[in-house]
Image (tube, helix red, strand yellow):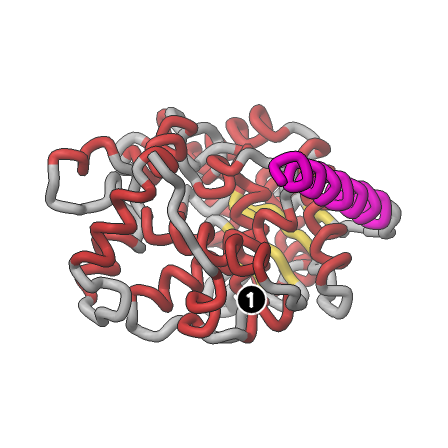
Amino acid sequence: MKKIALCFLIFACLISCKNEDSNRKAIDAIPIELQIHRFDREFATAKPSDIPFLKTKYPYLFPKQYPDSVWTNKIKDTLFQSLYKNVDSVFGDFEMQKKELADLYKHRKFYFSEVKTPQIVTVISEVDYTNKVILTDSLLLLSLDTYLGSKHPFYEGIPRYLSYNLKKENLSVDVAAENAQRLIKQKPDRTFLSQMIYWGKVYYLVDLFLPDKPDATKLGYRKEELEWAKENETYIWLYFIDREMLYSTDSTITERFINPAPFSKFYLEIDQDSPGRIGQYLGWRIVDSFMKNNPVSLQELLDLDAQTLFEKSKFKPLKP
């Protein structure tokens, strides 16, 4: 019986690998023409006489209540020019990011053919790290000065758990996450389980859109933080179950285990070693388990309520 089971496992793996190879060939063949406009570069190198042209080309970046003198002074501002020089040094011609974004949007088009590819505009937002990526149906704004490197001097004063992901490797991940959230129409209710499942769906889509990115990068974790989560998964799950947290609507649970934080708050000695947002990580594990155990379409996954998904997921935490 053991030999039969082993043969079946090997056969299943071969089928899975063939399907992945077939999908990859189909995805690579998808034609994608990204329209990328380097507004950051156009604006930083502009002359005062160029302002009317830029306002016509990018009207959504120039609020009407501000006179041209505001933009002229901004171009001359030494801090702004310093930001631009650092952006230019880190990103250069943006070719590497263009390839990553093209691959991302090929994957998105493969799984969601009806969704249009937006026009991409790069900007300098004076380190507005709360709005690194702004996505609409037709437009994607990327604040390049929020991806200069986690230890960049411009990020002094920003909490380390936030500045860690302010690096160019995370740009495509943030874009993938924004795309994922726009595709998930069903917002989570107040229960802890629903919020975990919501973020699980987000990371499941990010994983589909960026299959070559390390899981730790997708989660915004350090490698050792992801290893900690895996090694302690059983204990974390038992902690949630024993304290009957899954169906709780207590907002403090969201703050402790869902929202960005330097670590998750179990109120135990392990806290300082734990990564933040551990509930998001477990949500991804539950959704991944559901998809492995249920032959449903992606749209069915996205439409499914948290309770049904959880019941059908057959989720079992990793053994320590």
> Going by the picture, which residue comes out furthest to the front?
1
The location of residue 135, given as percent across then percent down, is: 57, 60
The location of residue 11, given as percent across then percent down, is: 75, 41
Residue 23 counted in the magenta span: yes
Boundaries of the magenta span: 1-28
Determine which quarter of the picture holds residue 241.
bottom left
| Foreground residue among 215 and 317 | 317
- The residue shown at (16%, 59%) is 243
Position of 157 relative to 200 (above/below): above
Residue 316 counted in the magenta span: no
- The residue shown at (12%, 34%) is 269
- The residue shown at (22%, 56%) is 255
Left or right: residue 286 compared with residue 176: left
Left or right: residue 64 compared with residue 252: right
The quarter of the picture where the N terminus appears is top right
Q: Main secondary structure of the magenta part?
A: helix
The location of residue 294, given as percent across then percent down, is: 60, 64
- The residue shown at (18%, 35%) is 270
Amino acid type at circle 1 is: Arg
Residue under numbered circle 1: 182
The location of residue 101, given as percent across then percent down, is: 68, 44
| Foreground residue among 208 and 244 | 244
